[in-house]
Structures are given as C-alpha cells and as structure tokens.
Image (cartoon, grey):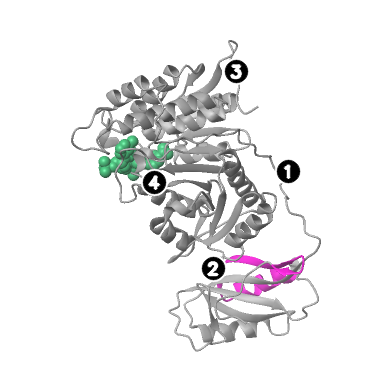
Amino acid sequence: MRYKLDSTGRKRVTLIVGDGIGPEVAGATRRIIEAAGVQISWEEREAGAEVFKRGLPSGVPPETIASIRDTRVALKGPLETPIGFGEKSANVTLRKLFETYANVRPVREMPGVKTPFTGRGIDLVVVRENVEDLYAGIEHMQTPGVAQCLKLMSKKGCERIVRLAFEVAVSEGRKKVHCATKANIMKLTEGLMKRTFEEVAKEYPQIEANHIIIDNCAHQAVRTPEQFDVIVTSNMNGDILSDLTSGLIGGLGFAPGANLGDEVAIFEAVHGSAPKYAGKDVINPSAVILSGTMMLRHLDEFAAAQAIECALMETLEEGVHTRDVSPSGSVSTTAFTDRIIQNLGKRSDRWKTRDHKPLHVKALGAAPDYVRPKTRRTVGADVFVESALASEELGKSLESLVEGSGLRLKMISNRGTKVYPATGGMTDCVDHWRCRFVLRDATTSLDDKSLLDLLHGLSTKYRWMHVEKLEEIDGEAGYTRAQGED
Ligand code: NAP
C-alpha cells in the first residue's frame, strides 16, 4: 500500500513545514488541500534548523523518522542546513533514509508568467536519480593536494530510475523519454545508465526512446525546450538540468518535486527556505502547492489534484500574482492562496491540465548482488601512488620493482592521461599516479597474495593510497583505458 488510513478513513500524511518560508508555503498548501475537500490526517513533525540547534547532527528526530516510516507519505517544506550545527543536509538524510531513489521534477509554462519562452508550450518532467552517483558524497584526499569523489552507479539504480521514467510517461500520457548521459566520456558509469535505458525501452514500444548527451541536452533545453517530454538522468546531471528547466518557466517559485521510493514518497518544492523572505507573506507558494497536487495523485485523489491545478492556473491567468512574477501590483502569499481557494471548481479553456493515471513501478529484486556474472577474472590492478618523481623516473623504478614477478607495469597515467611510456604529449603532472600492472600470463587470474606482494614491494619505496582490481566480467573489460593508452 502506497499510503495508510487512520481509524476514521482519512489518508495519513506526515507534514514537515520546514524552515524560513516553509511554514507559509506549507501552510498555504494545507489550506488549499483542505478547501478542496480531501480528508487528510496530518501528522506534524519537525526537521531542520531548530533540530540542528538542539544538537541533533542529522537534523531529523526519531519521531519524524517513525512517523514517515508509518504513514509512508510526507509533504515537506524546505529545510535549512545551518553551517556549524551539523554538516549533513536533513533533506539528503531523509531521501537516503527512505531510499527515495527518484526525484521527479515537472515544469510547464504557467499562465500570465512572462518568460523569454512564453508561448512555446514547455511541459516536461526531469526524472533524476536521487541516491547514487557523485552525490553519494564518498570523498577522500588521495594526496595532500589531490581530492577524489567516487561516482558510484549501480545496474539496479539505473534500472529502477529508467523504469520509473517510462512509467511517469505512461501515467501522464506522454510520448517520449530522453535519457541524458555523459556516456561518451564515462563509459562504465554513465554508460551503464545508457545501456540500461536501451534495454528497458524495449518494454515500452509505445514510447519514443532517445539517448542524448547531457551537455547537448542542456543546449537543446534552452534552444527548443518544447521538444522534451520526460528526461531521465543520473543524480548530479539531473540536479543541474532541473534547475535550468525551472528557470525556463519562471523560476523556483513554480518548480515542484517528488522524491519517490518503493516504500515512501516525500513531496517538496525544488526551492529552499529563502530566509530573507521568511515571515514577510510575500513569497510564491505555487511550487509547494504543485508538490501537493503530486502528493494527491499519489494518494489517488486525482480529481482534487486537478481541481487545485486548475484553480492555480485560473488565479495566475486573472493576473493575481506574487512579487516574483509581478514585482509591481503583486498580492501577498495569503491573498494569493485565498484566491486559489475561491477559484476551486473553475477551469480555464485555454490552459489544460493532464489526465493522470496511477503510477505503477515494480520493485526490483532485493538481493544486494543484483547482477550475477557467469565468468570473472582479475587481469591486473591499478595502484595509485603518491610520488614527487618525474614520470620517466617513476616508471623505470616501478619496472625494476616488478622484474621477475608475475606482473608487469603496463602504463602510468596522471589524472587519466597516459604519461609512461611517454606519448609525446605535454601533460602537466601532479604527485598522484595511477600505475597499471597486468599479468604477464594473460590466461590466468591475479590472486590476492600476488597483489599483496606487489603492494608490499611498492610500499618499501612509495606511499600508495588506493588500489583497484582490473576485473574482466563475462569476457568484457570492467575498467577503462587511460587517455592515450593502447
Ligand atoms: P532558496 O531558498 O531556494 O532561494 C534562492 C532564491 O530563489 C531566493 O532568494 C528567491 O530569489 C528565489 N525563491 C526561492 N523560493 C521562492 C519562492 N517560493 N517564491 C519566490 N522566489 C523564490 O536557495 P538558497 O538561498 O540557496 O538556500 C536557502 C536555504 O535553503 C539553505 O539553507 C539551503 O541549504 C536550503 N535549501 C533547502 C532545500 C530543500 O529543503 N529541499 C533546497 C534548496 C536549498 P530572489 O532573491 O531573486 O527573490
């Protein structure tokens, strides 16, 4: 069950009003949902700034976690991440705790909201992977001057986000899904998403499936945004692209979002707590109101969601605007909300809303080893070494270290570019070297003892900080070549 009922049959929702402008935008949304006649049992819980100040480093108290675990649905205002009261964002903590792996961010042209794109009919959804990729935040200083962030992407993570993107298209009657990746450069991580997209697309023959390189997608999204319907991306790409698309239709005041997982859904606007406007009754509540309509559809309240969306559009079409849309002649957040409530039941002929069907996403297998290969072999290892030597000197020294062993030095690269044996290039090197050792006998598999012997030998002369085994999985290289490596 996607949601739970209380003893009187009302749908239960955890409400976190949040920080800054949160109480105003979340309060406006609650008033409108209640005025639309939806019976919700709100469970108000805390998270964010005040919780950090009380000394809880996660910013999310156990009562809030327990409530969401129980209700399975939350409507959330923005949460601040105050500097000095805890380093982790309470928003990210909530997304990760409940494995809400999908971040769905729709944007559409809104009546009366003038932008350089007015009249183009922008109406698209960015479906962004929400828990993997660079935002997993696994970072290490490899040398005092070289930092690393791991970009971890899983087959399962790619499959579930891609599948959800196609299901969003089906539920909203959309015709196309673009998968936007940087697979041309990151062949294994971003490439995994591209390949998975191509496999899953076969299950949706009625939907046009296109791959597009992410930088071109950003370019196309500004040149001809109306060509896009659903765009699915990895985490960081989607974060950037969805802010860009919200800019096309009038800004963060109109950008709603849903964090969806197999068990829990958390609905929130893209924007933050805009502290300078807190308590001033001037901000635009539309993004949270639209997040609220996404929540209502999740609760199977399709008619109420449509009525609220229509009333919002009617209000904007009448020229009733908050300060961000019409700096002169604007109304307060409260007056804007009152007008939406008065307009419930009205429907513009010019501004259509989509008919939504329930979103069906099948959960994938729970086994952690989601992919089980038939064969695998370790053909060598990349050892990352810190050294102030020049590449030629380091290369010769490493070659002599492995002389007579089962391994040979194949090459050394510096930040991804092969520098030894010399290529004739002019690479500016730092003290962080990836040294690739491969088995002399290419028919065998590298055992851990030989690898440990290699590390032991290296450590007599050099500081090593990181090792990656070179795996061959089902006959395919599970590693990429360095730039310039043959
Ligand atoms: P922000 O709160 O989104 O505000 C940036 C600017 O966007 C505002 O100054 C305002 O622009 C405009 N804006 C945002 N919401 C608006 C609304 N409802 N109506 C009209 N205009 C709106 O971003 P920030 O200042 O970078 O972040 C502030 C805090 O929010 C930080 O602590 C951050 O960590 C947090 N945050 C939370 C979330 C979340 O909870 N999901 C997301 C992002 C940021 P003008 O100045 O041009 O009027």
Alpha carbons under labels 1 and 2: distance apart: 30 Å
Mark 4 vs mark 1: in front: 4
Pick whichever, 298 or 271, lies toward us: 298
Instruction: Name the image quarter holding residue 284.
Output: top left
Location of mark 1 (residue): 365
Mark 1, secondary structure of its residue = loop
Alpha carbons under labels 3 and 2: distance apart: 48 Å
Mark 2 CB near ligand 1 (8 Å cut):
no
Q: Position of residue 44 (x, y in %)?
A: 46, 21
Alpha carbons under labels 4 and 2: distance apart: 27 Å
**Earlier sequence position, callout 4 versus callout 2:** 2
Instruction: Name the image quarter holding residue 11.
Output: top right
Q: Position of residue 57 (x, y in %)?
A: 45, 36
Alpha carbons under labels 4 and 1: distance apart: 34 Å
Answer few, some or many: residues within 10 Å of disc 2's Cα (few below 14, many 20 plus, some between 14 and 19). few
Please, which residue is most extreme toward the bottom here? 424
| The N terminus, quarter of image | top right
Location of mark 4 (residue): 246
* Magenta part of the chain: 450-477
Mark 4 vs mark 2: in front: 4
Location of mark 2 (residue): 185
| The C terminus, quarter of image | bottom right
**Earlier sequence position, callout 4 versus callout 1:** 4
Location of mark 3 (residue): 5
Pick whichever, 325 or 319, lies toward us: 319
Say what amino acid the circle numbered 1 marks.
Gly
**Earlier sequence position, callout 1 versus callout 2:** 2
